[in-house]
Image (cartoon, rainbow, N blue to C red):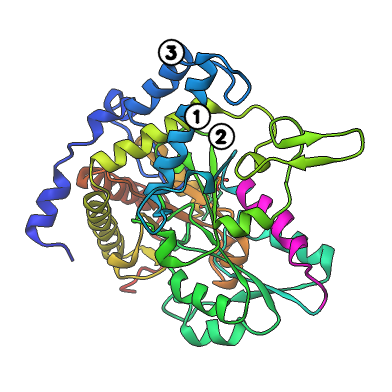
């Protein structure tokens, strides 16, 4: 439950004006930031600035424009590194630990394809993931295990949607070679203790990979503190452009991994019969990259930092709590996940009794309320939880939302219930 002061805080919204799509559509209720965030104007400006002031192919030229573009991308790497705590003992950001990809999915595929064969998985080995993984952190490991004969093992949840320390100790053992777990579930909104899971992975000599797609945009992340080996996330979920992903890794881990894609820009030298790879990160960045996108990702992170990430996180927690509380209060709605709103990072999944989530989302759309409905790329989770139709509705908040957005969602749900409901038992029944 929120205090009167917290309710007053989320009634205010000093952020919406920075987001052109939201500012131009005051009637729009956007509650699907877990799928992709809205972009602030500064990010759109940055894309334009790149093309109008420094457009040249980075790395390729020795002329000033190309050098400036190269420097801008190096700065972007440093900004991202600082944002996720990838700094050395002196606090200097480790930009060369930041590899640009197209999205979190590509980062995770890169890891599965290169770290997987590198640690030489065999039939006696295991890869451990959790049952709440997004397909992007599941299928690459499934494919790898199929190719190598290794076993794919799942960390499962207790009744309170937690991966318990007992489960971690039981499933991560001497055969485990790689552990890959999401820090925040894109369906349940819960935050996993990936630091404890990393500790256990390292105890047994396994690598620890973290899917940060839903955590990096919403909670302060520090890869040094987590002591994971690799982390993947996407720029578009934190207000940056679509088409930019990040893979962070410890230098010694990235150095030991072979390239994923080969071609231009990723080599030191090439002969007719062989090639020597360029150092990281270039080794993993074959061909011309989306330099404007990388530059605009820096703008997105600078924007978040300028608003104070801790403040944004607190606001998002309040919004998620208010959202969960309001949904808990609706007699015809079941929250799928913790009933305690403070455990939700952005996302809250729910169902309207007896109404298919697709119908819910379509009726809400008539009131200009955007939510996600379906399996959320987490089919094994929905099977495991035995959710009806193997689908849910999902509302997800960002700091640019406010109390009125959630109130409009609830008004829309009342409308859904008045159209479809009645014949179905409610919580009181
Ligand atoms: C937890 C999680 N991991 C990975 C992804 C994949 O992100 P992308 O589609 O940007 O590759 C998503 C996207 O929703 C996600 O929520």
Q: Mark 2 points at which residue?
A: 243
At horizontal 25% and vertical 59% (from top left) the residue drawn is 326
Q: Can residue 110 be seen in this view?
A: yes
Q: Does the magenta stretch include residue 269?
A: no
At horizontal 58% and vertical 62% (from top left) the residue drawn is 390
Q: Which element type, helix, strand or loop, lies under badge 2? A: loop
Name the mark nearer the viewer: 1 or 2: 1
Quadrant in which residue 15 is drawn: top left
Of callouts 3 and 1, which one flags the residue occurring earlier in the amino acid sequence?
3
User: Which range is magenta?
Assistant: 106-123
At horizontal 47% and vertical 28% (from top left) the residue drawn is 71
Of callouts 1 and 2, which one flags the residue occurring earlier in the amino acid sequence?
2
The location of residue 120, given as percent across then percent down, is 79, 67
Q: Which element type, helix, strand or loop, lies under badge 1? A: helix
Q: From the viewer's perspective, is 71 left or right of 4?
A: right
The location of residue 119, given as percent across then percent down, is 74, 66
Q: Is residue 190 visible?
A: no
Q: Which element type, helix, strand or loop, lies under badge 3? A: helix
Q: Name the residue under label 1.
A: 293
- Crowd tier of the residue under label 1, counting other residues whose Cα lies within 10 Å: few below 14, some 14–19, many 20 or above: many
For the residues bearing labels 3 and 1, Cβ distance under 8 angstroms: no
Cα distance, mark 3 to mark 2?
A: 21 Å
| Label annotation for residue 31 | none
Name the mark nearer the viewer: 3 or 2: 3
The location of residue 347, given as percent across then percent down, is 39, 56
- In the picture as drawn, the residue positioned furthest to the top comes out as 52
Quadrant in which residue 7 is drawn: bottom left
- Crowd tier of the residue under label 2, counting other residues whose Cα lies within 10 Å: few below 14, some 14–19, many 20 or above: some
**Above/below status of 37 relative to 331:** above
Which of the two residues, 297 or 349, is positioned nearer the viewer here? 297
| Label annotation for residue 53 | 3
């Amino acid at each position: 439950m929120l205090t009167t002061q917290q309710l007053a805080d989320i009634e205010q919204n000093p952020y919406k004006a920075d987001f052109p799509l939201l500012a131009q559509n005051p009637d729009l209720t956007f509650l699907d930031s877990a799928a992709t965030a809205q972009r602030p104007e500064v990010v759109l400006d940055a894309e334009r600035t790149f093309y109008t002031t420094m457009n040249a192919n980075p790395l390729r030229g020795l002329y000033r424009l190309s050098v400036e573009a190269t420097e801008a991308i190096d700065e972007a790497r440093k900004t991202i590194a600082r944002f996720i705590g990838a700094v050395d003992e002196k606090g200097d950001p480790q930009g060369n630990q930041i590899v640009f990809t197209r999205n979190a999915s590509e980062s995770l595929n890169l890891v599965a394809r290169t770290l997987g064969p590198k640690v030489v998985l065999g039939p006696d080995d295991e890869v451990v993931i959790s049952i709440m993984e997004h397909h992007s952190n599941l299928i690459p490991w499934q494919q790898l295990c199929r190719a190598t004969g290794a076993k794919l093992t799942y960390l499962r949840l207790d009744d309170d949607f937690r991966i318990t320390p007992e489960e971690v100790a039981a499933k991560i053992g001497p055969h485990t070679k790689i552990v890959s777990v999401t820090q925040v579930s894109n369906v349940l909104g819960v935050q996993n203790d990936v630091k404890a899971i990393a500790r256990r992975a390292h105890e047994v000599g396994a690598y620890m990979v973290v899917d940060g797609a839903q955590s990096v945009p919403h909670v302060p992340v520090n890869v040094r503190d987590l002591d994971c080996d690799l982390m993947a996330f996407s720029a578009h979920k934190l207000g940056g452009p679509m088409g930019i992903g990040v893979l962070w890794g410890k230098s010694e881990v990235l150095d030991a991994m072979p390239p994923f894609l080969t071609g231009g820009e990723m080599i030191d030298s090439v002969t007719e019969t062989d090639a020597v790879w360029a150092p990281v990160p270039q080794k993993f960045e074959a061909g011309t990259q989306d330099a404007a996108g990388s530059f605009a990702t820096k703008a997105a992170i600078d924007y978040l930092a300028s608003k104070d990430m801790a403040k944004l996180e607190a606001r998002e927690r309040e919004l998620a709590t208010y959202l969960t509380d309001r949904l808990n209060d609706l007699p015809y709605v079941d929250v799928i996940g913790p009933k305690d709103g403070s455990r939700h990072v952005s996302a809250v999944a729910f169902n309207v009794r007896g109404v298919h989530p697709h119908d819910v989302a379509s009726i809400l759309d008539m009131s200009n309320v955007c939510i996600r409905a379906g399996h959320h790329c987490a089919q094994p989770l929905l099977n495991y939880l035995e959710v009806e139709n193997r689908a849910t509705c999902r509302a997800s908040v960002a700091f640019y939302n406010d109390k009125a957005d959630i109130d409009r969602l609830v008004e829309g749900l009342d409308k859904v219930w008045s159209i479809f409901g009645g014949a179905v038992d409610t919580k009181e029944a």
